Image (tube, helix red, strand yellow):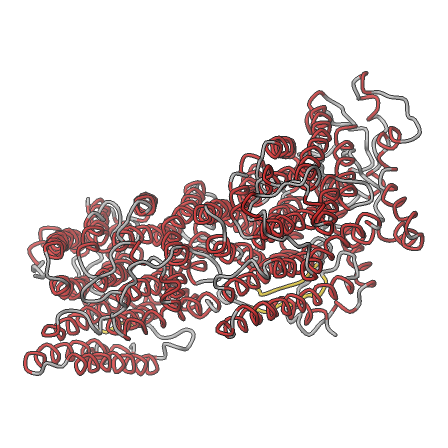
Amino acid sequence: MNPLMSLDTVWLLLPEIVLVATATLVFVGGAFINSRVGFHLVALASVLVAAGLLFRQEVVLGMFEPGAVHGHSGPILIDYFGHALRWLALLTGGLFLLLSSRAGPDDLATEVTGSLLLAVAGLMLVCISGDIVLLFAGLELISIPTYILLYLGRDNAASQEATTKYFFLSILSSALLLYGFSFLYGISGTTELAAVRQAVVDVNIASRSGLAALAPLAMVLMLAGLGFRIAAVPFHFYAPDVYQGTTNGNAGLLAVVPKIAGIVALIRLIVAAMPGVESVAWQLVLAVAVLTMTLGNVTALWQQNIRRMMAYSSIAHAGYMFIGLAVALAVAARGGDSPAADGVAAALFYLVVYVLATTGVFAVLVYLSSRARQIDGVDDLAGIGQTHPLTAICLAIFMFSLTGLPPLAGFWGKLSLFLGALAVDVQPPSTGLRPWFVSLAVIGALNAAISAGYYLRVVGVMYFRSPVNVPRAEGGRGAWLTAAVAAVLVVAVGLVSEPVFSTARRASSSLHNPAVLEMEANSALPRSDDRTVPPALTQAIPAEPAPR
Amino acid sequence: MNDSLILLATLLVPLLGAGVICALAPAGRGTVRWVAALTSVVALVGAAVLAMRFPGGMEVFAPASWRAALSEGGLDVRLSLGLDGLSIWLFALSALLTLTSVLVSWEAIRERPAAFYALLLILETGLMGVFAARDLILFYIFFEFTLIPLFFLIGIWGSEERRYAAVKFFIFTLAGSLLTFLGLLALVLWNQQAAGGELVFSIPELTAGLARVQQADPNLVLQSWIFLALFAGFAIKVPLFPLHTWLPLAHVQAPTAGSVMLAGVLLKIGTYGFLRFSMPMLPHATMTWMPPLLWLSVAGIIYGALVALAQTDIKRLIAYSSVSHLGFCMLGLFAVNRLGVQGGTLQMINHGLSTGGLFACVGIIYERYHTRQINELGGLARGMPILAFFMLVFTLASIGLPGLNGFVGEFLLLLGMFQRGWNVGSPWETQFLVIAVLAVFGVVLGAWYMLWLIERTFFGPPHQPAHDELHEVHDLTAREIAALTPLAVLIVWIGVQPHVFLEPMAPVLDNLVEVVQRADLGPSQGMASTEDGATPGATAGLPSSAVVSTEVASITNPDSQAGPWSSGASPSRSSAIPLPAGADRSSNEPPLQGQAKRPAWMIRPPQEGNAALLDKPAVAPNLVTSYRLQSSPAASTEASGNIVPTPPSGGSLVKTGGRL
């Protein structure tokens, strides 16, 4: 018997619980005590406490040892993948808390802080959920506080429009996702991902019913639902308008947190839990990747508003991450390939790199803004290379990293993605996938060159133009600190990328480790004893309760 | 002292200097520029010591290696450094031109001097790193990294159109080098796919590995694709003819120091890339793509020269002359014979010295007259005889006056090109002759526009810009003389003693040429001469002779065997490439039947002198030797016994019954 099975679910969720409890405290307390700084410090402390608890958990679980034990406790997965991404979520949360030390009107500051904490808790939940209901709950726990944050952003028509637009489209995407989930449930008769995987395998083997044909449909619907959160073409339309309409801090949050959640959920749902659909999925993801990065990069070239530009940049980077997912799916479809073609690891590494640089960019923008005048246009940055030299260096580092220039972190991200794409179908027997993925890598490389156009424009404006209308830089020390931390991390990951990369590889292999899957399948057995024959649709569908 | 330590220190000193400069920024221009000058002198001394201690031969000199970056989890990227004959002079050239750049910017840079010098020194590290990197990824990191300091140097301190020039330069070169990056990754993956095992990123190991792989299966289609991917980046850097449009803009808009570094060193990264990656790793594709590349090179030569003739701006004229001269370098390299490659490689150094010097002179003129228009200047020699002297030396070197370096390089590479065209066997191959003739025409054009430039600006009636009439113009200061003298000295030195510079490069280049020519076995262009039955082993694919050359090299250089920095025990650090067994050197003699195969109009009776020399390429390298005989007999005897072991393969390709 797996000793982990006996671990208390509450203990496993303790970091998230701490965050949610603190959020509640902040919400309630903020109604009585008006102390922006006090509650902000409490929130930061709670992130640190959560980090400590997470660390303690991993020591107890032996996560740091090679060949760590994996398993799950109820709907919560205990694997390296989930834990590594929880750290990323906590880091992101901490950075955004720091960044928004002066966000929102004074009397509503606690709402901002509390909502941020809830979103982080939701993100962490997504990372470890091994059950589609919990996964959906996590995703909603990200979305709902985001609506509040968007609403709190600014008191003007553009902001209202952005909030409403995001709200409706987010609901729509949730509906699409749920629709996909319902098919998944119909196929497998369970909500647990490990059992879903087993069931999909069974369905494929048996292929007695038409159930197998439903798997691609479920996959497409889930891709659509999550594609919205990742801002992948063709679900990207909201992003430029929403980013432009809201504040710099909120735009940063939208560019980062839903993207992590979406990528993680995609990996958990489609790459790991749906064997058999890969042969369809890789083609779809490849097409989406090409469209997303090309459209994002090309459109960004014309943008004058920096948030709009960063929105297209965020779309483009979603496309790069899809390269990794396409590689992972294709490798699964052809049943293994050279170890260099580790698409999941590449996508995760790229995700980290992207999150650091993008958070940094928005932190700089927040720092340079003031209540009276927000940084909006690229031209607002003119000459800050002379007036704010350190901030400008940070922003230049982020821009170069997003372009993918060595020796910064972004270079290693592109390296791992391109290497992965070129390594597909290298090992015999050839399955004819190679031309597709070589073309994908070439398109990716050309896109990186295109992206240099708009990233360099920002650097050029900062350094090559004389300062006019110098920004007041009243975003607070927190924002400056966030930018500095992010810049240091981008450089550090660039110089010593090995720890991050080996973490990503371990996370990826924990996802694919057959031992884990077997263990997961075994532990799921008690609930699915008689599921060698897939349950009939007629039984499954009424049994499904509406999660919302 | 350990060579590896010197190499490491030479690379790190500029970075350290840049750090000190940033720290001293408040102290002002006076302090900062002295720190920069001191730093670049120290780096130059380091590079000079390395060049003096360089033993020649095939062995990697001053190797140093650490595990780095992604080394766990299957990607063994290493921080591995080292020099060889190919890179040692370019490495030293980077250090030398940085000093020149610092000295010519002494007065010109008034705005944000600390940032300027810091970026210049960072650029120096980047450029030296490109030439010292022994790891593919490390090479690419330096290759790409050089863009960042240059982007700022052009964009902040350039002239009117600097922002456009900086962005165009950056995006143009980035677009190409990203494709190059894919090509490099494809090389690594190909090696792994065929040879199995880990991904190998070490350049020497990869070269050797790919040679083995290609013996078993040349996979011409894949080679061609990878070659084109590498070509994208390298050709833009060079720049080859249709891809040169970034160059005039960037060179003209850059500050003097930026122009010197761009023209002097940065362009050479492209040709170096061809020499380091495309040619040894993809020999079959090199031979396949040779004719179009030669045509592009010669198009660049003629086009660059003609456009230079039409310029009214001195800096623009010199920029277009770079397009023309780099065409010569490429022509030499892709003649793919000993003379051509040696000439092309030497011409890379020559162009760095002469064009670097010319840009420095233009900067000096601009500082005094605030104009670069040719028609606003005249008779400068009267007021500034010393500047006129240096300008004349650089100009004459650039047009290839015998006795100066440009002559040696151009002569060797044109000779190589004629060799390529001489043993003509088919109408298809007469194109090489046409190319060679056109290239000679380019030399004439080069002399025309350069002499025309110097005639109009330095001689003739004195003529100065109107607004500077009252301004007393002084001749060169001691600082400016110090900046230009080393370049002029080297120009004369290479001109009279080219063997000093050619010999360290010769073994590596000869090996390279041999590898590429071996690849051109079989019925190329339908004129195979299968009579040469001495090389059946070429198809058997057994590595044999590389071991020998490695051992010879290690005897001459026992020091470099095990430095404390070479922590990784790599099985072969030599860049020697295994050659097919049986394809021994004797088979490299020119096929006698070559004569008979020529069209009737080409056949000439063997005569004394040049015609015979070209007819029988075996004699041609003696030209180099005869240079030696004139200057230092001792060196030549040593050289003829040791350094030039290969009988020349010349323009004659080895024709065997090999398959393709």
Taking B338 as reference, is B41 left or right?
Answer: left
Residue B71 in percent (x, y) is at 52, 66
Q: Is residue A151 above or below residue B26?
A: above
Give me the residue at 58% from left, 47% from top: B469
Q: Pick out the residue farthest to the front.
A: B470
Q: Quadrant of residue B298?
A: top right
Give me the residue at 73% from left, 52% from top: B386
Residue A419 in percent (x, y) is at 47, 53
Which is more toward the observer, B165 or B143?
Answer: B165
Taking A127 as reference, is A460 left or right?
Answer: right
Position of the N terminus of chain B, as image quadrant, is bottom right
Residue B86 in percent (x, y) is at 71, 53
Q: Quadrant of residue B59?
A: bottom right
Residue A311 in percent (x, y) is at 26, 53
Taking A176 as reference, is B585 left or right?
Answer: right
* Res. A201 in view: no
* Res. A408 in view: yes
Q: Is residue A389 above or below residue A477?
A: above
Position of the C terminus of chain B, as image quadrant, is top right
Number of on-image labels? 0
